[in-house]
Image: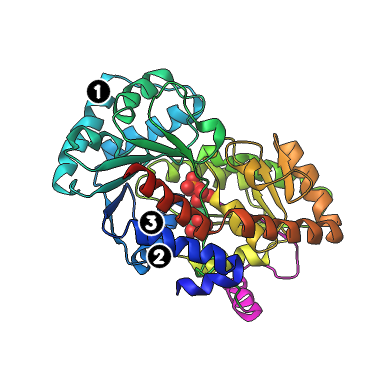
């Protein structure tokens, strides 16, 4: 199956992946994260782990367990790290540490290479016996709330290296080697491969979306960082000038306890506008997400904070112009005026919605550039190669 990527990346790139894999084939590798489904990390691991296996690597993936108390704590860490403010006390740190210990029964620690994703399982390093440990951080840690960062930093400093998604997330208060590896999408996955127009139409019909009216879409967990209320506001402002529909699609993630609360606020803000479609889909609704992104005239990712924003590359790969929040990993993908537009407010977003809805030629040009930008920079084969290189580096 890995040969199928050749048409996107060429044979040299593919050969280099096989060559590096050969060098590290005797190592055992474990990925550890905090959810099997929901959110970008699970999305990538669901594709990355099978690809690594296909290269003959000895790789496994384990998910830590936790109760709602633990995931409330880790979500508050997540928010504090990304927003620079928080309301955290000693009790939170104790709960975090307690669950690292509980997870000793879930997570084997005797692999040669341990990839620990994000803050939730980062404290497992306390129990390191051997091997090389890499902390793979997917969130924006450029301006963290100091009490939480200082707590985590004790652990992160014990790693052999860390990976961040965007250069500005690198830390100068940590001595270990740091790599910059942006995330990626899989062009062959159900979510991203080309699907027939009939499938798109069937799915739109099923969800009551009018195929004949321009569709503006945001696919995101119901999380304040994704600014769902700002999306509604931008749509409402634009709706005064152009006749559009808004689709906001989210799904629950087991490690994100805030979703329901945010969802209820969004429902309220949407009111009784028949052109607003709010969907809470089960995880693994990849075909539906593909259809929605494919059917969209414009895609939004109006995040206020964002690690990377896979949804941006997913839409760009489908040749959609994206209006993205000017934050975190979004500007790596959205080059203003070339592959989409960057915005800092609902007003800015509504301006570009109107502009794009009225300009088919511009939409087409941005969409074409967008796909090429993703092909060169954000396909899974590039991230796979970066991971293999990191493993080769730390194990040397
Ligand atoms: N996603 C999904 N269904 C939803 C909402 C999101 O499948 O209802 C997927 C989305 O397509 C993307 C991932 O979840 O692949 C979200 O990754 P992103 O990096 O955009 O954000 P995160 O949730 O990791 O903050």
Which label belongs to residue 37?
3
The residues tagged by marks 3 and 2 sit, at their Cα atoms, a distance apart of 18 Å
Whether residue 31 is visible to the viewer of this picture, yes or no, is yes
Residue 383 in the image: x percent, y percent?
49, 53
Q: Is residue 388 left or right of residue 127?
A: right
Q: Cβ(mark 2) to ligand 1 < 8 Å? A: no
Residue 349 in the image: x percent, y percent?
73, 42
Residue 214 drawn in magenta: yes
Q: Which stretch did the figure color magenta?
A: 196-220
Which one is nearer the viewer's eye here, 147 or 158? Answer: 158
Which one is nearer the viewer's eye here, 259 or 27? Answer: 27
Residue 139 in the image: x percent, y percent?
47, 38
Helix, strand, or loop for circle 2? helix
Q: Is residue 152 above or below residue 389?
A: above
Can you tell which of label 3 and label 2 is closer to the viewer?
2
Task: Give the residue pinned by disc 2.
Answer: 51
Can you tell which of label 2 and label 1 is closer to the viewer?
2
Q: How many marks?
A: 3
Instruction: Decide which of tag 2 and tag 1 comes sooner along the chain.
Output: 2
Task: Give the residue pinned by disc 1.
Answer: 91
Helix, strand, or loop for circle 1? helix
Residue drawn at 47 percent across, 30 percent down: 141
Residue 351 drawn in magenta: no
**Image quadrant occupied by the C terminus:** top left
Whether residue 283 is visible to the viewer of this picture, yes or no, is no
């Amino acid at each position: 199956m890995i040969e199928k990527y050749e048409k996107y990346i060429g044979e040299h790139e593919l050969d280099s992946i096989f060559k590096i894999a050969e060098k590290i084939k005797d190592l055992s590798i474990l990925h550890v994260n905090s959810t099997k489904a929901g959110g970008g990390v699970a999305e990538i691991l669901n594709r990355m782990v099978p690809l690594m296996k296909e290269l003959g690597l000895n790789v496994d993936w384990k998910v830590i367990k936790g109760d709602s108390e633990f995931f409330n704590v880790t979500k508050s860490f997540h928010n504090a790290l990304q927003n620079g403010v928080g309301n955290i006390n000693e009790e939170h740190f104790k709960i975090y540490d307690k669950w690292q210990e509980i997870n000793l029964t879930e997570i084997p620690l005797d692999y040669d290479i341990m990839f620990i994703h994000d803050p939730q399982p980062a404290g497992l390093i306390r129990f390191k016996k051997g091997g090389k440990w890499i902390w793979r951080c997917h969130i924006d840690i450029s301006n963290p709330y100091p009490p939480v960062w200082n707590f985590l930093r004790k652990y992160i400093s014990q790693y052999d290296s860390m990976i961040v998604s965007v250069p500005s997330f690198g830390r100068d208060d940590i001595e270990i080697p740091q790599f910059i590896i942006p995330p990626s999408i899989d062009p062959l996955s159900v979510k991203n491969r080309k699907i027939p127009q009939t499938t798109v139409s069937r799915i739109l019909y099923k969800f009551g979306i009018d195929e004949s009216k321009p569709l503006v879409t945001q696919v995101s967990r119901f999380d304040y960082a994704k600014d769902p209320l700002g999306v509604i506001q931008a749509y409402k402002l634009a709706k005064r000038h152009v006749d559009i529909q808004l689709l906001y699609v989210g799904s629950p993630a087991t490690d994100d306890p805030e979703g329901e609360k945010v969802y209820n606020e969004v429902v309220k803000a949407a009111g009784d506008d028949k052109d607003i479609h709010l969907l809470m889909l089960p995880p693994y609704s990849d075909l539906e997400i593909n259809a929605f992104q494919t059917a969209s005239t414009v895609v939004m990712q109006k995040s206020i904070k964002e690690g990377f924003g896979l949804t941006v590359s997913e839409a760009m790969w489908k040749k959609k112009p994206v209006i993205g929040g000017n934050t975190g990993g979004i500007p790596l993908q959205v080059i203003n005026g070339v592959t989409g537009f960057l915005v800092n407010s609902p007003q800015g977003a509504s301006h570009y919605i109107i502009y794009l809805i009225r300009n088919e030629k511009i939409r087409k040009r941005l969409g074409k550039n967008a796909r090429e930008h993703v092909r060169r920079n954000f396909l899974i084969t590039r991230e796979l190669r970066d991971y293999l290189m990191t493993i080769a580096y730390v194990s040397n």
